[in-house]
Structures are given as C-alpha cells and as structure tokens.
Image: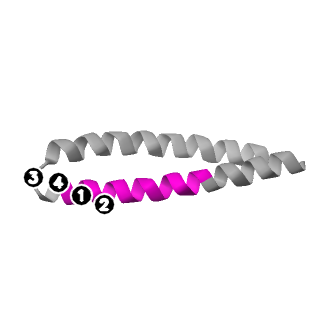
Amino acid sequence: MDEKAAITADTIELLLLNQTAIRAALEELSLWVCQRGSTHVHENVMVVLTALDTHAEAISIGIERLRS
C-alpha cells in the first residue's frame, strides 16, 4: 500500500469511528425520547440509524480495499 492510500484509509477510518460514536449517541437520545412517549420520533431516528449502519458497512469495505 502506498503512503497516500494509507493516509486516506486512516483518515476514513477515523471518520467512521466518529460516525459510530454519533450513531450511538443518537440512539441513546432516541431511546430517552421514546421513554417519554415520542415513539414516532424514535421510529424515525431508528430508520436513519439503519441507513448509517448500511453506510458504515460500505465504508469499511472501502477501507479494506484501500489497505489491500
């Protein structure tokens, strides 16, 4: 792997870690909101979190390809 690909993979991996942390925080907030009766808001957030999970998988694959 050349240096540019390594730097790119490392940078994208850091962004992925940030995305994962933000996802976890959103899920915690969504559960808190749900417990207070706003189930519709919670359901909407969960749909978006599913999209984040799908994107995280694609990002992981891209990182693996950069490192190979």
At 37% from the left and 59% from the top, the residue drawn is: 25
Q: Is residue 30 magenta?
A: yes
Q: Distance between the Cα atoms at labels 4 and 3?
A: 5 Å
Label 2 – label 3 distance at C-alpha: 15 Å
For residue 35, side relative to residue 53 (left or right): left
Q: How far from the left and from the top, in percent, is residue 58?
A: 59, 40
Residue occupied by mark 3: 37
* Residue 28 numbered tag: 2
Assess whether mark 1 and mark 2 are in contact (beta carbons under 8 angstroms): yes
Amino acid type of the residue that numbered disc 1 sits on in the rendered structure: Leu
The coloring applied to the image is: one colour
Q: Which mark is residue 31?
A: 1
Labels 2 and 3 touching (C-beta < 8 A): no
Give yes or no for residue 48 being in the magenta stretch: no
Q: Which residues are magenta?
A: 15-33
| Within-10-Å neighbours for mark 3: few <14, some 14–19, many 20+ | few
